[in-house]
Every structure is written in structure tokens, then in C-alpha cells.
Amino acid sequence: MMIDIIKTKAETIENFLIKAHAPVMKYLQPGISSLETISICSKYGIVPNADIIELYEWRNGTKLPEPGEGYLEGLVEIIPFGAFYNLQYSLSEWTLFQDLDYFENAGSYLPIFGSMEQDLYGYKLDTGQIYFISPGMQIYGDLAFHSLSTMLDCIIACYQKEIFHIDPNKGLEIKNYQLFEDMKQHFLKE
């Protein structure tokens, strides 16, 4: 029997969000099947690995706001600069990312979490590492996490240690951004 490590960790995060009455819960979409993930990715020439398949089986990211609905970023973030992109949006951002060619091999990174202002966490397709990319701050691929699993571990730890706080009306708030940076560094050392 295969253990769904990514899905289990994502469900742990979801439990924190449910308990906190997080507004993001109104926007998270149901998961999609592994076959659907593979089919959608194949249209872009991407072969998703087990981590990406599991993540999108858990949830197909966040529903994007409708025109006129307003700016929802704070309401839909799970991690700072991190709304969970639905697979279709992730792949459209991946396509845009390649076209803009911010840095060498930009197409190697699948945006999975990010802001609506091009700050994002990119999943490096060949290694599974997570890189933070922020063109506005001229950050073109700083290693943020060794894997999607360690990224989820860090998010869980930040909720457990109350570094991340959910306001039921405003969404994600960070009590002390430096504590989040310290937690990321802790997981990079593991």
C-alpha cells in the first residue's frame, strides 16, 4: 500500500485552516484525479511526478476571483506569497514564465504557490526542489525548500508554532516575518 505523504501533509494544513475558519477554505477547489493531472500536464509537454499528482489530488488549488470580485490575495494565501495555484493557472503561468524568460531555464520551474504579482514558489521539474522567485525584487530562483514535502513540513510547523495566524476576515497574517525566514532556514539545513 502506497502512503500519500504529500496528500497527508496537505490535509494536516487544511485541518489548521478549517479550525481557524480561514477564508481560503471558500476558494480551495476539489482535487482532481491523477489521470486528469497527467492529461492536463501532457498538453504542455510536462510529465508530472508523484508529488505534483498527490498535491492536485488533494485540492486543485484556489479558485481565481471573478471579474469585479476584487483583490483576494490575503484571503487565499496559505503561506506568505503563496496562494495555491490551480493546475490550469499554474500551467498558464509556466507558459508565461517561459515567454518572459526572466532567467536561464525559467521553464524548468512550475509555479505552484504564489502571489498575483509574479512572486512565486516554483517547483523545479527535474529535481523536485522549491525555489522562490520574485522578479520585482530581482530574486531569480533562491532555493527555498529541498522538496515539496519539506515545504509542507515548514508550513505545518509555522501553523503549529503560531508564526502564521489566520484572521477569519482577513486571511493569513504573519506575526513575525523573521521567524518564518528562520523556520525556512531550519528546514533547508535538514
Image (cartoon, rainbow, N blue to C red):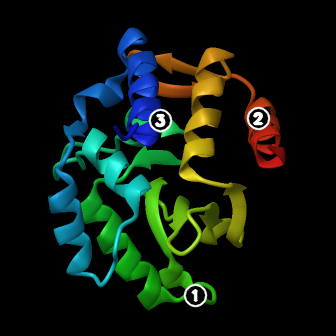
Label 2: which residue? 183
- Is the Cβ of the residue at disc 2 closer than 8 Å to that at disc 1? no
Badge 3 element: strand
In which image quadrant can residue 11 be found? top left
Label 1: which residue? 105
- Is the Cβ of the residue at disc 3 closer than 8 Å to that at disc 1? no
Horizontal side of 2 relative to 136 (left or right) equals left
Badge 1 element: loop
Q: Residue at x 23, y 61 (%)?
A: 37
Horizontal side of 157 relative to 15 (left or right) equals right
> Tag 3 or tag 2, which sits nearer the N-term?
3
Judge whether 36 appears above or below 11 on screen: below
Amino acid type indicated by mark 3? Ile
- Is the Cβ of the residue at disc 2 closer than 8 Å to that at disc 3? no
Find residue 43 and report its horizontal and vertical position in percent: 20, 80
Label 3: which residue? 78
> Tag 1 or tag 3, which sits nearer the N-term?
3
Find residue 168 and report its horizontal and vertical position in percent: 39, 15
> Tag 1 or tag 2, which sits nearer the N-term?
1
| Number of marks | 3
Q: Nearer the viewer, mark 3 or mark 1?
A: 1
